[in-house]
Image (cartoon, rainbow, N blue to C red):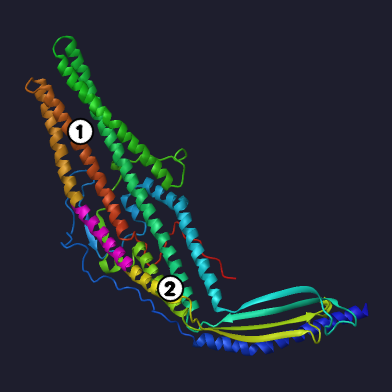
Amino acid sequence: MKRIRGLRRSHAASAATAGLTLRLRLRPLCALIIAAALAGCAVGPNFRAPDAPAVPAYTADKLPEATTATDAPTGDAQKFLEGQPVPERWWTTFASEEIDRRVEQALAHSPTIASAQAALKQAQENVSAANGGLFPSVDANVGAQRGNANSFGQLAPGQSVFNVYTAGVNINYTLDLFGGIRRGIEAQAAIADFQQYQLEGTYLTLAANVVATSFLEASLRGQIEATEEISAAYEENLKLVERQHEIGAKSLADVLVIRTQVATVRAQLPPLRQQLARTQTQLAVYLGQFPAEVTLADLDLDGLTLPREVPVTLPSDLVRQRPDIRAAESQLHQATAQVGVATANLLPQITLSGSYGSQALHTGDLFSGGTQVWSLGAGLLQPLFHGGTLRAEKRAAEAGLEKAAADYQTTVLGAFQNVADSLHALELDAENLHAQYDAEQSAKQSLGLVNIQYKEGAASYLQVLDATRQYQQARIGLIQARAARLSDTAALYASLGGGWNEGKAPALAQATPAAAPN
C-alpha cells in the first residue's frame, strides 16, 4: 500500500514537472505567435459604405404640401411632412384595433419570421466559428500500439512483442500575416449583417402584406354589399314587371330584359366572394395559422381612418432606413472581403506547431522520468503552381465585387422608384377619389330622377335599368378608390423603410441572439 501511494506521489510530481517544462518550452512559441498577429496586415481593399445619393427629392416635380380634399369618406387631405421619420408601428396610424391585432399576431407567429431568425442565428454562429481561426488549435491525444521488434530501449532481453502508450498535447497555429483569416471573418460578419437586414425586411414585408390584404378584404366586403343591394333592387323590380306582364301591362320583352339584368348582377357576386375567401385564407397564412383555424373579425372601410399627416423622410436618409438597401450594402461588404481572402491565398503562409507528451511501454510510466517527448516546428508554404486556380479565384472575386456594386446601385434606384411611385399614387388617389365621389353622387341623383320620371310615365324602364347600372358602377368605383388611398398610404410607409432603421428590429419579435463562442 505504501508503495502504491509513493508511486501516485511520484506520478503527480512528474506531471507537475512536465506541465512546467511544457510552459517554459512553449513560451517562445507563444511570444512569436503574438508578435506575428500584431504585425500582420490585411491585404485587399478596405470596405467603405457607399455615400447616400446626392439627390434633393424623390420626384422631378415639387411635392405638394397636401393632397386634394373631398367630402367623400376617407376624403381628407393628406399633408406631407418632409424630413419626418416614419413611425415604428406605422400600421397603428390607421386607427384599427383589428389591424393592430393582425399585425402583432403575424409578427409573433409567422413561420417566415422564424425562418429568418434561424438564418440569422446560423450566420452569427458561423462568425463565431470563423473567429476561431485567429487562435491556435490545441488537441490532446492518447494512443496505444502493439508491435514486434528485436530491440527497444526498455525491452527485457529476449522480449520482441511490446505495447507502446502515448499521451500528449499538439498545438498548431497559422500566422495571419496577410489577413486572409481576418478577411474571411469580415466576410462572415457581412453575411450575418445581411441576414439581420433580411430579418428586418421580413418584418416590414409581412406587416405591409397584412395591412394591404386587410384593406383589400374591407374593399371586397364593401363591393359585395353594394352588389347585393343592387341585385335586391333589380329583383324587386323584376317581381313588379312580372306581375304587370301577367295582367298584360308589360310585354315579355320587358320581363326578359330585366331578368337578364338580374342575372348579370348576380353573376358578379361569386367572383367577388371567391376573391374574399382567398383573401381571408391568405391572411390566415400571414398570421401563421391554418385557414380552418383562423377567426377574423369583420373589417369594413368605415372602421378605418386615413392618416392626415404622412411623413416623408429625406432622400439622403433612405439608404439607412430600407432593409433591402442595407442588405445589398452587406453583400457589397462581403464581396469586398472576398477579394482580400483570394489575394491572401496567393501569398506565403507560415504555420507554427508544437507538441509535448510522453511515450512509455506501460501506462503507469507515462510522464515519468525519461519518457517525455516534445517538438517545435515552423513551416512556410508559398503557392507556386495551381493550374491558374488561385489567380482565377482572385479575378472571380473582383468580378463579384463589381457585380455587388452594380446590384447595390440597382437596389437603391429601385427604392427611390418605390417612394416616387407611392407619392404619385397618393396625389392621384386623392384626385381619383374626388372624381369617383362626384360620379357616385351624380349617378345617385340621376337614378332618383329617372325613377320619378318612370313613375310619371316620362321615362322607359330601360332608362331606369341603365341609371341603376351606372349607379352600381360608380358606387363600386368609390369603394375601390377609398381602399386605394389606404393601401397606397401603407405602401408609402413600407417604401420608406417602415420606421426600422440602423439595424433596429421591432420590439414585438426580436431575433434570438447567438450563443457565446466556446
Residue 234 vs 23, above or below: the answer is above
Q: Looking at the picture, which amino acid does disc 1 mark?
A: Gln
Residue 284 pos. (x, y %) = 42, 43
**Residue at (32, 53) in percent of width and height:** 93
393 left or right of 130? Answer: left
Magenta range: 406-427
Asked which quadrant contains residue 163, the reply is: bottom right
Tell which circle, 1 or 2, labels the residue nearer the N-terminal end. Answer: 2
Q: Dot 2 surroundings within 10 Å: few (below 14), some, or many (20 or more)?
A: some
Circle number at residue 66: none
Regarding residue 466, the answer to whether it shows in the image is yes
The x and y percentages for residue 130 are: 52, 72
Q: Quadrant for the N terminus, please.
A: bottom right
Q: Is residue 456 above or below residue 208?
A: above
Q: Which residue is mark 2?
A: 393
Q: x and y percent of residue 452 in the render?
A: 11, 24
Q: Is residue 126 left or right of residue 197?
A: right
Q: Which amino acid type is shown beneath numbered disc 2?
A: Glu
Q: Which mark is residue 472?
A: 1
Task: State yes or no: discs 1 and 2 in contact (Cβ < 8 Å).
Answer: no
Q: Is residue 451 visible?
A: no
- At horizontal 80% and vertical 74% (from top left) the residue drawn is 147
Residue sitting nearer the eye, 441 or 315: 315
Determine the main secondary structure of the stretch shown in magenta: helix
How many marks overall? 2
Label 1 Cα neighbours within 10 Å, binned few <14 / some 14-19 / many ≥20: many
Q: Position of residue 244 (x, y in %)?
A: 17, 13
